[in-house]
Image (tube, grey):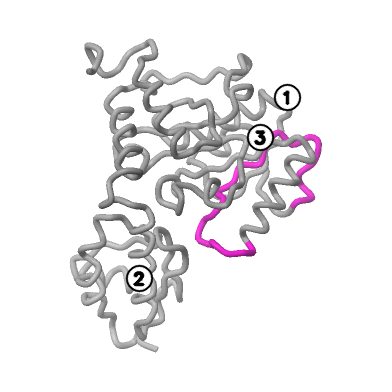
Amino acid sequence: GLYGGYSHSLATTQEVKTAEKLKELFPFVNTWKFLKTGAEACAAAVKFAKAATGREKVISHGYHGFHETHFTPHIIEYKDFSQIDDSTAAVIIEPVIVEDSPENLDWLKSLRAKCYKHGALLIFDEIVTGFRFKDYSVARRYGIDPDLFIIGKAMANGMPLAAVGGRSAIMANPKAFVSSTYAGEVLSLKACEAVCDIVQRNSDFRVSDIWSEGAKFIKRFNAQDTTVKIKGYPTRGIFTGDPAQVATFMESMVKAKILFCKSWFFTWGHIPEMDETLERHKLPKWLKK
C-alpha cells in the first residue's frame, strides 16, 4: 500500500523493495540512495567520492546537470589521462554519449585501470543510458564496474526519480550527508519497481527489441539522399550536418507534425510511428545532395 500517504520523513519498506529490484538489473551495485533529479544524483555522487577519498579534485567528461560548476571550484574538464593523479577524488563521465565503438570501449577500460592505480573513484553517469542501453547499462554490457553509478529518466517511466549507487563503504560514509525531502516518495519508487519487472519479464518491452528497431530507423534515415544524418547508437543520437541545414530539417519536420530536437532518442512509443515518420521526412530540394 501507500503507508497512509506517499511522501514521508522516514524511510519506507518500498525503498528497500525498489533497491532490491534495481540490484537485479545492476548487480555490481549493493547500496542505493534515491533522489529526484539527475543533477541531484550527480552532485551526491561527487560528494560521496570526495568524502570517501578525502580529496577535492574532480575530473568531469560529459554533462552532469545544470549546477555542475556549482559543486566546487575543483571540477576540471577532462582532456587526457595525465590529469588523473593521486590528488584526484573522482572522474565522472557519461561512458557512452553517442560514440559506442571499440575505441570508446578501450578508453573506458584504460580509464578504469587509471582510476584504480591512483585511488580515484570512477563515476558512471548513466542517466541517459540506464535502462536504454543493451543489458540495461554500459557498465553491465561491457563488464566495467564503476565505483559509483547514477541512473534517472527511464528508471520510473517518467515519474520523478533518480538514484546513485555504489559500495556500502562509500555510500554509508557519515562524512557525506545527502538528504532530500521528496527522495523517498512512494509513487515513483513503485513505478521504478514496476519498470524493473517489465523490462526483464515482459516480452513486449525487451531492451534488445528497442535496440534492433532503433538501429533499423537510423539505417533507413541515413540511407535517404539528404545531407542531414543521425550519428549515435540505436536509442540515442544527434543530427549531424551543416548547422543551418539541421535547423531547416527540424523546422520542416515540425511543419510535417513531427517534433525533433538536435538530440534524438528512440523509445518503444516510436516503433509504430517509424514508417510514417520516414515518409514525412521530405526536406527542401536545396537540402538534397
Does residue 94 belong to the magenta stretch? yes
Q: Picture coordinates of residue 191 (x, y %)? A: 29, 33
For the point 25% across and 62% down, the residue is 271
Q: Which mark is residue 54?
A: 1
Crowding at dot 3, Cα within 10 Å, few <14 / some 14-19 / many 20+, comes out as few
Crowding at dot 1, Cα within 10 Å, few <14 / some 14-19 / many 20+, comes out as few
> In this picture, is 248 found above or below 6?
below
Residue that label 3 marks: 73
| Amino acid beneath label 1 | Gly
Q: What whole-number distance in Å separates the C-alpha atoms at marks 1 and 3?
A: 16 Å
Q: Which mark is residue 64?
A: none
Quadrant of the snapshot with the C terminus: bottom left
Q: Picture coordinates of residue 209 (x, y %)? A: 34, 59
Residue that label 2 marks: 216
| Amino acid beneath label 3 | Pro
Which region of the structure is painted magenta?
81-103
Q: Mark 1, mark 3: which one is toward the viewer? A: 1
Sequence-first disc among 1 and 3: 1
